[in-house]
Amino acid sequence: MRVLSTLCAAAAATMVIAVPASAATLSEQKAEVQRVERELATLDARAGAAAAEANEAIDAAAEIKRQLSQTTRELKTSERDLAIGQERLAERLIGIYTNPAPSFEAVMLSGLNPGDVLEARNLLDRAARNDGQLVGQVKERRVKLTSLREKLADESAKAQRRAQEARTRRAAVQKLVDRRRSVLSGARAELKKLLDQEKARRSRLAALKLRPKSSVPTSAATPPAIPLPGGGSHVFPVAGPTRFSDDWLYSRPGGRYHEGIDLFAERGTPLVAVGDGTVYRVGWNGLGGWRFWLRDTRGTTYYYAHLESFAAAAKEGAGVSKGTVLGYMGDSGSARGTGVHLHFEIHPGGGGPVRPWPYVTSWPRVG
């Protein structure tokens, strides 16, 4: 009876643990994770394009506002010059009419040189005419500045509306991105749960020396990696110890959005080409400081900004290979005072920016 009870118990246990997690369920869940990842990549690209559009609109509005402010200052200066010119002209005219030219007899009796008197009179007349011309020019300039200010004020209002509309569109896309990331997180959690169940089942079967009946692979515990932009092999852009977080599309001063990711390292750390390609737009701008672009062999472009300096290989139009040192970590441009870092962007096909985090975290380091 004791042997029979033991056999029955073993059979019952076998019946329980021999029921595998459904291969179809695991396969379907893996496919769902991959589908959501593809949708999220598309939404990320849309969010990046919307952020770039919003940044451009904000920059355009800021430039018009700057022009409007400058025009207003120039108009005030012009009005002040006009008031001074009119006052000076009035004084000239008053002098001419209250001090008429002396008669020939008066000049002779006074002992003055007639030529000097005539020259003085001519100088006064020319000065009055010059003052009159200056007043006319200032009046003309004031009219033009007034017209320009009105035009710029109208354009500024339109630009502000465009910037707000662009921000609204980006916010709407970002909501979709956040929603899909939440769905992806849930799908990955469900996949992990199923894989953990399958792993536990296989462990119990192995303990009982039974062969598993399911052929479902367990290698999918890590979700499939997102394909690299444009394909091909790439490397991490910083050749040294680096600190960073997923700060893509974070808010920036002036309402702008962060179109890349900030990679922090020591000043002077080498920056390398992430792939084989061509270097272009090597130089300076006010926002990025010392910066350059790299276009890889598949057409994806990469933006490096805030460099301390360029390496010899960073020449306009130069072809470079993966891992070539192109510059050195710094804090030029708008990064001054925010810490030494590389601002790095990825633009598949040279289009709008995409979220760099999935790519840079999978690229191998060099150096």
Image (cartoon, rainbow, N blue to C red):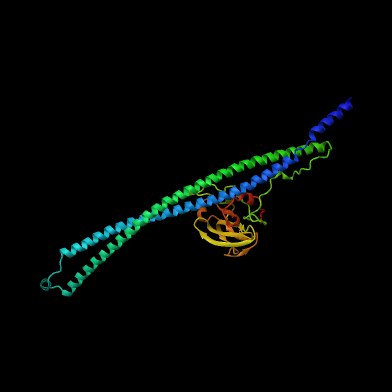
The picture places residue 157, in percent across and down from the top left corner, at: 41, 50
The picture places residue 224, in percent across and down from the top left corner, at: 69, 47
Q: Quadrant of residue 318?
A: bottom right
Furthest residue in direction top, as rendered:
1
User: How many numbered discs, if any?
Assistant: 0
Viewer can see residue 258: no
> Does residue 52 appear left or right of residue 82 in this picture?
right
The picture places residue 146, in percent across and down from the top left corner, at: 34, 56
Q: Quadrant of the N terminus?
A: top right
- Taking the spot 44% from the left edge, 55% from the top edge, the residue there is 63
Viewer can see residue 157: yes
Q: Quadrant of residue 301?
A: bottom right
The foreground one among 271 and 195 is 195
The foreground one among 115 and 303 is 303
- Taking the spot 20% from the left edge, 72% from the top edge, the residue there is 119
> Does residue 137 appear left or right of residue 350 in this picture?
left
> Does residue 93 appear left or right of residue 356 in this picture?
left
Compared with 187, 117 (above or below) is: below
Q: Quadrant of the C terminus?
A: bottom right
> Does residue 207 appear left or right of residue 149 in this picture?
right
The foreground one among 319 and 163 is 163
The picture places residue 267, in percent across and down from the top left corner, at: 57, 55
- Taking the spot 18% from the left edge, 63% from the top edge, the residue there is 95
